[in-house]
Every structure is written in C-alpha cells, then in structure tokens.
Amino acid sequence: MTTANTVDTVKSLIRDIQDFPKKGILFKDITTALRDKDGYKAIIDFMKEKFADKKIDYIAGMESRGFIFGATLAYELGCGFVPLRKPGKLPAEVISESYDLEYGKNTLEIHKDAIEEGKRVLIVDDLLATGGTALAACNLVKKIGANVVGMAFVIELADLNGREKLPKDVEVVSMLVY
C-alpha cells in the first residue's frame, strides 16, 4: 500500500527547472526521481496498486516519458505496451490526433492495428498539465475501438485544469498533485 511518506519521498526527488522549455514555465523534472531506484520503484508500485484489479489488456504510453513508466508498468501488470508517438515515427499505417500544448501544438499517432477492438487500455504519462496530450491519447484509443479504463500520471498540475478536459467515465490517477 502506498503511504503518504512514499508520496512525500517521491515529491522530494522532483526538481523544479525555471523557464523551461520557455520563459515563464516552471518545469517539474522527473529525471531525478528516475535515477533514484527507490523513487522509480515507488512510482511504478503506486500505479500498479491503483490499476492491478482493472484487467488491463494494454498500456498506451505517450512519447516519450510515458514510455518509461508505461512499459515498466505493462511488465508489472502482465499486459502489452503500445507506444503513442509523434508524427513520422511509426512504420505501419497510423491514426493521428492533433492537440494543443501549454506552449504549442503537436500530434500523436498510433498504429491502426495496435489494439484490438473492445480491449481495455490504461493510458500512462509523466505529466497531466492542460490535458491536451492526454485527451489526444484517449481519442486515439477510442478511434481504434478500444476502451480507455484509466489514465495514470506521475504529476498533475492542478492549476492548469487538465483533468476537466478528460472524459468523466475514465478513472484518472496522479501520484503527485501540484
């Protein structure tokens, strides 16, 4: 069971980088938590605990930090992993979804045949900010006929209201909320 002490420990491992990737942004850097074996394990254990009983078929991880957490979590839950990539990175036929970021625009793609219709999918990423990337991921999974049963994030920036953009019928879990 995840304790408040574990959450506080992981929170202490996240460093703030001012004015990255542009002036006015306070970036929450997770690389310091990743390099700490206990911090990284605590993050994966937190997500595993939250979704262990949800019968997940696939985890869809968003490029690029969603790969780090999503692939490890897929291994822990005994399910498949599907990468959601930026344009031009996937070799087979894709479906695309464009979205707004807090500092620009981007697009996510998924292989058209990545997930079978009706399968249960957990979307994983490091950060929930404005919700644009997470909503695009959710839309991609739904476009190919799968069911999004949850979304897991390491960090949520509550002041940016990203959670409000996400479907109300999908469980959203964040380990750290700022």
Image (cartoon, grey):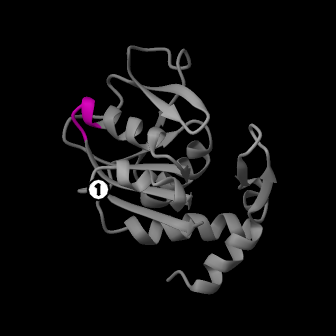
Residue found 45% across the figure and 55% down from its top: 161
Image height of 28 relative to 37, above or below: above
Image height of 13 relative to 77, above or below: below
Residue found 54% across the figure and 68% down from its top: 175
Left or right for 20, reference 173: right
Q: Which of the 4 image quadrants contains residue 21?
A: top right
Tell me if mark 1 has few (under 14), some (14-19) or many (20+) residues whose alpha carbon lies within 10 angstroms of its own. Answer: some
* Residue 151 on image: x %, y %: 40, 54
128, 71: nearer the viewer: 128
150, 45: nearer the viewer: 150
Left or right for 131, reference 144: right
Q: Main secondary structure of the magenta part?
A: loop
Q: Secondary structure at mark 1?
A: loop
* Residue 24 on image: x %, y %: 73, 45
Residue found 57% across the figure and 39% down from its top: 102
Q: How many marks?
A: 1
* Residue 129 on image: x %, y %: 53, 50
Q: Which residue of the protein is positioned furthest toward the front in this rendering?
A: 24
* Residue 46 on image: x %, y %: 52, 70
Q: Is residue 44 magenta?
A: no
Chain part drawn in magenta: 142-146
Residue found 64% across the figure and 85% down from its top: 5
Q: Which of the 4 image quadrants contains residue 86?
A: top right
Q: Read off the residue under disc 1.
A: 170
26, 60: nearer the viewer: 26
Q: Which of the 4 image quadrants contains residue 13?
A: bottom right
Amino acid carrying label 1: it is Val
Q: Quadrant of the C terminus?
A: bottom right
Left or right for 152, reference 113: right
